[in-house]
Amino acid sequence: MKVATQVIEQLISLIDREGLKNGDRLPAERHLCERLSVSRTALREAIQQMNSVGITESRIGSGTFVKDVQKIKQNQPLVALSDNLILQTLTPLLDADPLYRLDVQEARIVLESGTAWYAAQRATKQDIEKIRFYYEQLANSQAHGDTEQAAIADANFHLAIAEASQNAVLLQMMKNVFHLLRHNVVLARRKIYTEHYGFETLHTQHMAMMNAIIARDSELARKAVGEHIEFVIKQVAKIDEATARRQRVSRLATDVF
């Protein structure tokens, strides 16, 4: 069983055991980590998965609250929380052939360009605050060398834009592929930052996306998202090509000598 799934079980048990109702606040993150004996990364991932299906709701600066305890009473399968059907179908393909990750990035261009377009038109003050929060969390995490947390903040930044679109279908589609998106972001970030490619460019691109939404410029927001994801595709392709070239040369040197 995955760590996140185990933490979800523990959280559900805690909610049930303590009789928490809709609107009740979960204990602070630090206390939950201590009580459940889990890392902050595992806890945050579990809470994000519970948020994605509407059991809990995280509010910036306030904490995480029970949103729909009835879903727990209905014994909703844990697999729906941690491994939705899309992820179960695509993960083996991604593991078997890295080129499938290109399909993920292309799908992101189509989906996220649309959410950014509508976000620029419909984002509320709270939506913009949330987008800015994750943008700053992303920058701070990367500045402190916390690549894993930066990847989570990166994915949350994109998900916050989807939420700001106020389109229930687009939002649910983004939530359904959220874990696939985060996995994709982690892989891309590891390559780009390990190889020292484009840190400042990515930072500038995220800022451009956020500023376009704040400025209510739908076309600029859509363009900024497309350019950002296309940049990631090209940079990862360059890094993969350079890595493959070095491996070929290394094999040749071994054969010759």
Image (cartoon, rainbow, N blue to C red):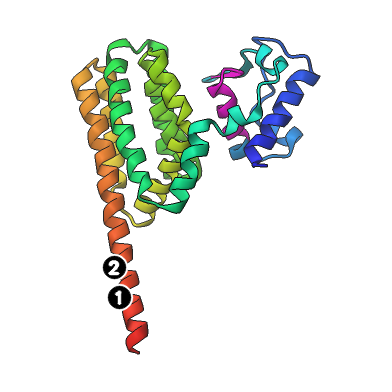
Foreground of the two, 145 or 172: 172
* Residue bearing mark 2: 245
Query: Residue farthest to the bottom?
Result: 257
Q: Visible in this render: residue 96?
A: yes
x 44%, y 47%: residue: 94
Q: Are marks 1 and 2 in contact (CB under 8 Å)?
A: yes
Mark 1 element type: helix
Q: What stretch is highlighted in magenta?
A: 43-58
Percent of width and height locating residue 146: 49, 45
13 is within the stretch colored magenta: no
* Tag 1 residue: 249
- Residue with the most extreme right position: 17
Question: Would you place residue 228 above or below residue 59 in this image?
Answer: below
Q: Which residue is drawn at 27% across and 24% down?
A: 211
Q: Is residue 39 left or right of residue 142?
A: right
State which quadrant residue 84 falls in.
top right
Give x and y (percent) for residue 227: 22, 36
Depth order, front residue of 97/242: 97
Amino acid type of the residue tagged 2 in the rendering: Arg
Structural distance between the alpha carbons of marks 1 and 2: 6 Å
Q: Quadrant of the C terminus?
A: bottom left
50 inside magenta stretch: yes
Above or below, 241 against 174 in this view is below
